[in-house]
């Protein structure tokens, strides 16, 4: 359960993303190796996801640096703080349908049930669109009434509210593509196109000679980039789902809503966990510190790339194997997957820590103070990789409710730690709060996975098997 810091809108590539759904041009995806062994499917799916995510994070970093230098640390902090709220609202609006789509679409596709595939796609878009528009209106109204007219945070918050429906529907589209096996392709618009468009917009504004760009203007540019991203992603989804487009949709709204509820809280809990430190830093310290922390956590998140790629590739595979009774193919490989993820994460984390100061300096001299917390956040990625993708195992095998309860506990721990440590230690308090939460959260998931599934994904299991084998040989 690596820290998946939701970027401040900075995660995508070029307009050719829409063409990536063509078989001759697509990136490595699970669909192309659906008949291959489980190990090959995981390797190809992870490689494609890592390629897209890695390029996206590089683009995101460049765009964030452009924004930070154009806005200054104080205004950039206001932008980051407002976008943290936008992300939380978008995850609330999606109601767990992102995870439900991956799980149920994988099942329906495995059984060639086209009517249910079509029904779930249509109904999920309808429900999420309604919830997102309602939330955006309510949040915008609260922001307008609660913040004074001369408060610079007011305008950026109002523009950010308009982003909520776009981001929520983007997540639905991404989950649908992932369930169809197009894991890497599903991430292209958000991870590559969106930050590229935002970065180009910031450069274009700078080339006009205007020095009046503020946080609200930056959020407006982000909104424009997100709308274009949504249009491109919708074209990709339409092409991928062409085989089921003419099927008469069969809906099970009540069943889907009931099953999505615990998955919804897992998603909300996850976003609260990764955004609570930014939000609370903005409330209890300053929005400038929130901006610095977000940049550092973005850099530290590079260490979690491998775990993220493995988790994204595993989700549809675990759901499909569990639904078709082929789970024995996955169990022996879990330990190997975790071991590979841990060693790769450790190597990347070491590189991140060593290069921290010069990289943070690119954002501006104010951001160099973030080096004091970089090693703490990088260590949390290593410990998370050692625990393995137990959250994926629980969510994709029908154990969403236990996962939701454990996520609730983790949210409470994280918020409590931040409330105590941020006023005392500032940036370091937020970083230590995250490290404590990662350790407790992953430990709880590992124990619960072993109780419910009979195995867990932590590095402890393969180490224990090696020790037993060594003792037996003696």
Image (cartoon, rainbow, N blue to C red):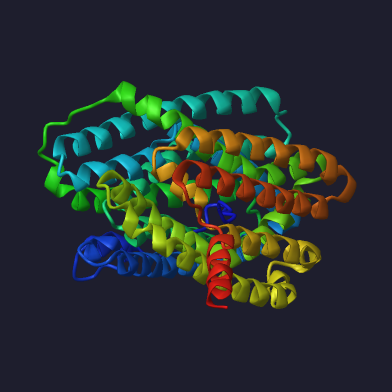
- Position in image of residue 274 (x %, y %): 62, 47
- Position in image of residue 474 (x %, y %): 57, 78
Q: Using the rendered image of the protein, determine whether residue 37 is visible from the camera's viewpoint.
A: yes
Q: Which of 19 and 114 is in front in this view?
A: 114
Q: In this view, does 50 lie to the left or right of 385?
A: left
At 41% across and 64% down in the image, what residue appears?
333
Q: Is residue 147 left or right of residue 125?
A: right
- Position in image of residue 168 (x %, y %): 43, 39
> Vertically, is 256 above or below 86?
above
Q: Nearer the viewer, residue 191 or 143?
A: 191
- Position in image of residue 125 (x %, y %): 32, 34
Q: In this view, does 112 lie to the left or right of 386?
A: left
Q: Is residue 383 left or right of residue 258?
A: right
Q: Nearer the viewer, residue 145 or 281?
A: 281
At 71% across and 50% down in the image, what residue appears?
434
> Vertically, is 355 above or below 381?
below
């Amino acid at each position: 359960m690596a820290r998946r810091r939701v970027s401040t809108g900075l995660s995508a590539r070029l307009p050719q993303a829409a063409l990536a759904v063509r078989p001759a041009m697509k990136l490595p995806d699970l669909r192309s190796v659906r008949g291959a062994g489980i190990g090959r499917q995981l390797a190809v799916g992870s490689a494609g996801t890592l390629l897209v995510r890695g390029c996206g994070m590089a683009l995101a970093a460049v765009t964030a640096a452009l924004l930070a230098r154009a806005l200054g640390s104080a205004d950039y902090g206001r932008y980051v703080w407002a976008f943290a709220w936008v992300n939380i609202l978008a995850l609330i609006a999606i109601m767990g349908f992102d995870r439900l789509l991956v799980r149920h679409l994988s099942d329906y596709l495995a059984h060639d049930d086209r009517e249910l595939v079509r029904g779930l796609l249509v109904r999920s878009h309808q429900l999420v669109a309604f919830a997102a528009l309602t939330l955006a209106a309510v949040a915008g109204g609260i922001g307008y009434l609660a913040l004074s007219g001369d408060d610079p945070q007011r305008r950026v918050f109002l523009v950010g509210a308009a982003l909520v429906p776009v981001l929520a529907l983007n997540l639905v589209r991404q989950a649908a593509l992932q369930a169809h096996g197009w894991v890497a392709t599903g991430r292209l618009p958000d991870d590559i196109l969106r930050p590229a468009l935002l970065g180009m917009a910031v450069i274009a504004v700078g080339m006009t000679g205007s020095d009046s760009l503020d946080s609200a203007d930056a959020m407006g540019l982000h909104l424009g980039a997100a709308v274009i991203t949504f249009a491109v992603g919708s074209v990709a989804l339409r092409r991928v789902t062409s085989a089921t487009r003419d099927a008469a949709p069969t809906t099970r709204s009540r069943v889907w809503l009931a099953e999505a509820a615990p998955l919804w809280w897992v998603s909300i809990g996850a976003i609260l966990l990764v955004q609570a430190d930014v939000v609370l830093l903005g409330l209890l310290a300053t929005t400038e510190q929130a901006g610095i922390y977000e940049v550092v956590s973005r850099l530290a998140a590079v260490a979690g790339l491998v775990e993220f790629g493995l988790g994204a590739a595993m989700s549809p595979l675990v759901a499909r194997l569990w639904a078709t009774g082929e789970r024995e193919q996955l169990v022996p490989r879990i330990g190997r997957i975790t071991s590979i993820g841990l060693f790769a994460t450790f190597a990347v984390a070491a590189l991140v820590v060593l290069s921290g100061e010069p990289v943070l300096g690119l954002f501006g001299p104010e951001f160099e103070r973030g080096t004091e917390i970089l090693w703490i956040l990088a260590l949390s990625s290593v410990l998370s990789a050692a625990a393995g993708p137990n959250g994926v195992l629980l969510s994709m095998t029908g154990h969403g409710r236990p996962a939701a309860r454990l996520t609730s506990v983790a949210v409470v721990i994280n918020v409590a730690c931040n409330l105590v440590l941020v006023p005392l230690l500032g940036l370091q308090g937020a970083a230590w709060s995250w490290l404590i939460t990662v350790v407790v959260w992953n430990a709880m998931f590992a124990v619960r996975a072993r109780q419910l599934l009979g195995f867990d994904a932590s590095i402890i299991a393969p180490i224990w098997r090696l020790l037993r084998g060594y003792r037996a040989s003696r």
